[in-house]
Every structure is written in C-alpha cells, then in structure tokens.
Image (cartoon, rainbow, N blue to C red):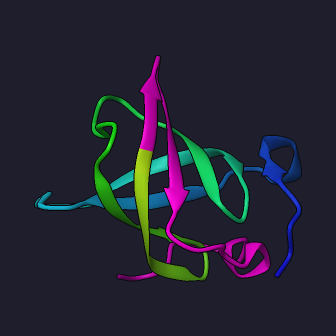
Amino acid sequence: MHERIFTRSDRESMNARVWPAGAPAASVHEIRTLTMCGACLDHDGELQMGANTRVSIGGLANVPAIVTWVREGRAGIRFDYPIDLIVARRGGLAAA
C-alpha cells in the first residue's frame, strides 16, 4: 500500500461519495486531505459525528467508514481498513 498523504496541492479536485447508514441517497463531498486511514471532507451539515458510512473515492467503492469529527463545514472520516491511495486517485467516483 502507498502511505503518502494527498492534499489539495497534489490534485486539482477529488470528491468522495458518502452514504450514511439509513440515508436515502449519497452526498458528494470535496476531499481536503486523504490518507490510507481516513479523510477530511467539506460538508454542509449532511454528516453526523459517529455515523457509520460507506465511501466511494476514485477507483474505490463502498469502503466502510465512520465519521469521527464534524465542525465548521468540515468532517473527518476513518476507514475501517487502510485504502490504496493510488487506486483512490484514479479518476471519477466509483459506482456503489
């Protein structure tokens, strides 16, 4: 696995599709910082601390995660297992 941290300076724009458990639909969030273990996302109140979610980023689909913190337009998520950052950086949003 690749351990490098990716930030906005590493790419133009990267998004995550997030499905909180029980939500009728996914929400799309710009990624501020991405590591093997989690991410910092922009959000407008859709994410709640402690929520179990599924996340799709680039070539990765349906990764289990939990929202670990929420404040001032940002939220932190922790993946249930380390992700491959090279696969995550592949274009677009993976399908569910």
Up-down: is 95 above or below 11? below
What residue is rendered at 14% in x and 57% in y?
23
Q: Is residue 75 magenta?
A: yes
Image quadrant in which you'd find residue 95 = bottom left
Up-down: is 7 above or below 16? above
Q: Position of residue 74 (x, y in %)?
A: 50, 30
Question: Which residues, given as a range, are shown in magenta?
Answer: 68-96
Up-down: is 12 above or below 32? below
Q: Nearer the viewer, residue 61 or 82?
A: 82
What residue is rendered at 56% in x and 80% in y?
60
Q: Position of residue 85 (x, y in %)?
A: 75, 72
Q: Position of residue 31 (x, y in %)?
A: 61, 47
Q: Is residue 57 magenta?
A: no
Image quadrant in which you'd find residue 22 = bottom left
Residue 55 is left or right of residue 46, and the answer is: right
Residue 93 is left or right of residue 26, and the answer is: right
**In which quadrant is the C terminus drawn?**
bottom left
What residue is rendered at 73% in x and 71% in y?
89
**In which quadrant is the N terminus drawn?**
bottom right
Q: How many marks?
A: 0
Q: Nearer the viewer, residue 28 or 68?
A: 68
Q: Residue furthest top?
A: 72
What residue is rendered at 66% in x and 75% in y?
83
Residue 35 is left or right of residue 28, and the answer is: right
